[in-house]
Image (cartoon, grey):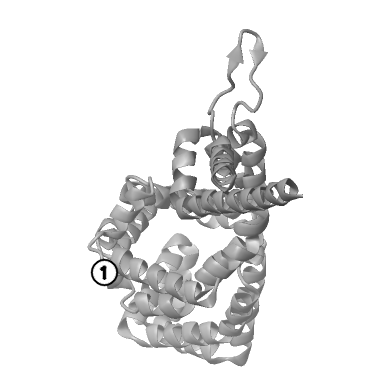
Amino acid sequence: MALIGALIGGYTNHLAIKMLFRPHEAKYIGNWKVPFTPGLIPKRRDELAKQLGRTVVEHLLTPDTFKRRFFSQEMSRKAEIWIQSQITKQVFESDVTIQQWMQKAGIEQIPNRVEAKIDDILDEQIRSMEMRFATKSIRELAPEQWMEKANQQIPEIVEYMLSKGESFFDSEEGRQTIKRLVDDFLSSKGTLGNMIQMFMGESSTIVDKVQPEIQKFLRAPGTFELIANIIRGEWEKLKDRPLQELIGGFDWQPVLSTVKTYVKQELAVEKRLDATLQSYWPDGANWTALNFTPKLTNFAFLQGEQKLEEMIHRLKLEDMVKEQVDSFPVQRLEELVLGISKKEFKMITVLGAVLGGVIGIIQGLIVYFMNMI
């Protein structure tokens, strides 16, 4: 009985372990399905896959797990160091020019496009200027401080004019000018002019008399006020006239062409774009390490942590685990489980044999004592 009980117990446990996986598929006799086929795990494979997926999502790959693993201070520091090393190596220590960087970004023909843009801007500014000059007066166009400055300059202008006039008429050239004016005047008057010349003498004599009077007129205080008032009046009239009337017919194209050429020469776009970023920004790597990379890393980690749960949800880990378990061959799953728990399964078989043997001994003792009675 002990031997039979041990055989039954050991074989039963061994069979139970095998029935976890075997048979792999349902067996039929005709249309009748053989009981206990397929094995427990193949039969419950869909439920097992769902449960494994739920377990992974709820207990293994949870948002907290990812946060502890990937969003720690240590990981943040490592990411910052890596990002900065890539920026330094790929950007600031690179021989790639600014134009080549733009070409990588899909921006082609930069010098031509910049120069064309300069032409468009200057053309637009000239057109705008011409329209303003055609419709607006000097008073509207000139800044207030310019107008005030011009008003303050009128006395100086008058004083300068009188000073130059006095110097001119006091010179020999001025004397000759007066003589020509007197001669022209007398000749234009015919007989009356000859009579005046007879009474007053030669034209040089008349010049000697007129010249001091002109000098006296120029030095008179009233002359200064007269000319100043005339200039102020004309200046006030001039302010209200459109500027286009003063510069009408002015050809802007030569000026525009000169300005375009000057701007393009000064900008030297192609030459500037052929330099590396390092040449324009020698301290760029240090600046990014202090000001850019830490903020970028913190922003990326903050956004990643905030979006982590949504990302995990979108990944559908539960469905991924389920699909993988469903696609995993049962034979391979059996080998994996038995390979890991082979020793334990043997112990279960041995334990079944031991228990069966003990039960057989107890049964044998019971039968023995019953036969004695």
In front here: 265 or 91? 91
In the rendered structure, which amino acid carries the disc numbered 1?
Glu
| Total marks in image | 1
Where is residue 250 shown, x and y percent of the image?
Answer: 44, 51
Relative vertical location of residue 184 with respect to residue 201 in this rendering, above or below: above
Q: Is residue 284 visible?
A: yes
Instruction: Look at the numbered disc 1 and give the secondary structure of its residue.
Output: loop
In front here: 262 or 103? 103
Relative vertical location of residue 97 with respect to residue 327 in this rendering, above or below: below
Q: Is residue 250 visible?
A: no
Quarter of the image for residue 108 reads top left
Q: Which residue is mark 1?
A: 93
Where is residue 12 shown, x and y percent of the image?
Answer: 58, 40
In the image, taking residue 24 as reference, residue 37 lies left or right, namely: right
Of the 4 image quadrants, the one containing the N terminus is top right
Where is residue 61 shown, x and y percent of the image?
Answer: 60, 57
Name the residue located 48 percent from the left edge and 88 percent from the top edge: 215
Q: Quick one: which residue is furthest to the left in this view? A: 95
Relative vertical location of residue 257 with respect to residue 281 in this rendering, above or below: above
Where is residue 163 shown, x and y percent of the image?
Answer: 46, 88
Mark 1 neighbour class, 10 Å CA radius: few under 14, some 14 to 19, many 20 or more: some
Q: Quick one: which residue is furthest to the top in this view? A: 30
Q: Quick one: which residue is furthest to the right in this view? A: 373
Name the residue located 30 percent from the left edge and 55 percent from the top edge: 99
